Amino acid sequence: MHEFSIVSYQDGYKQEILEVWESLVLATHDFLLLDDFKEIKGAV
């Protein structure tokens, strides 16, 4: 079993958070066109 803790956001986490977000969106949002995804990603 893994232990985890909730910590405050730090800028150093940004890239990892974005990678998780991207993989989850691509895996679950089949209705989203790739161009739309790229546009949204650019805004994030």
Image (tube, rainbow, N blue to C red):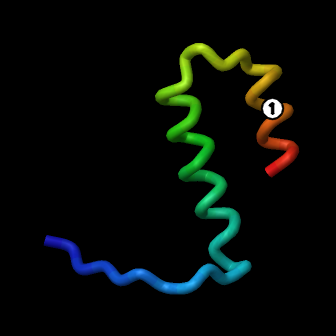
Most foreground residue, 28 or 23: 28
Q: Residue furthest left?
A: 1
Quadrant of res 40 = top right
Q: Amino acid at mark 1?
A: Lys
Q: Is residue 5 left or right of residue 24?
A: left
Q: Which residue corresponds to mark 1?
A: 38
Tell me the crowding category of disc 1: few under 14, some 14 to 19, or many 20 or more residues within 10 angstroms, Cα based.
few
Q: Is residue 23 left or right of residue 6?
A: right
The residue at 86%/43% (across/down) is 42
Task: Give the answer, above or below, for where 28 lies relative to 32.
Answer: below
Residue 9 rendering spot, x and y as whole percentages: 62, 80
Residue 15, position as x, y percentages in the image: 68, 63
Q: Secondary structure at mark 1?
A: helix
Quadrant assignment, res 3: bottom left
Where in the figure is residue 21, as x and y percent of width and height?
Answer: 58, 48
Q: Is residue 4 above or below residue 15?
A: below
The image position of residue 18, as x and y in percent, is 65, 55
- Quarter containing the N terminus: bottom left
| Residue in the picture at 85% in, 32% down | 39
In-image side of 28 versus 37 (left or right): left
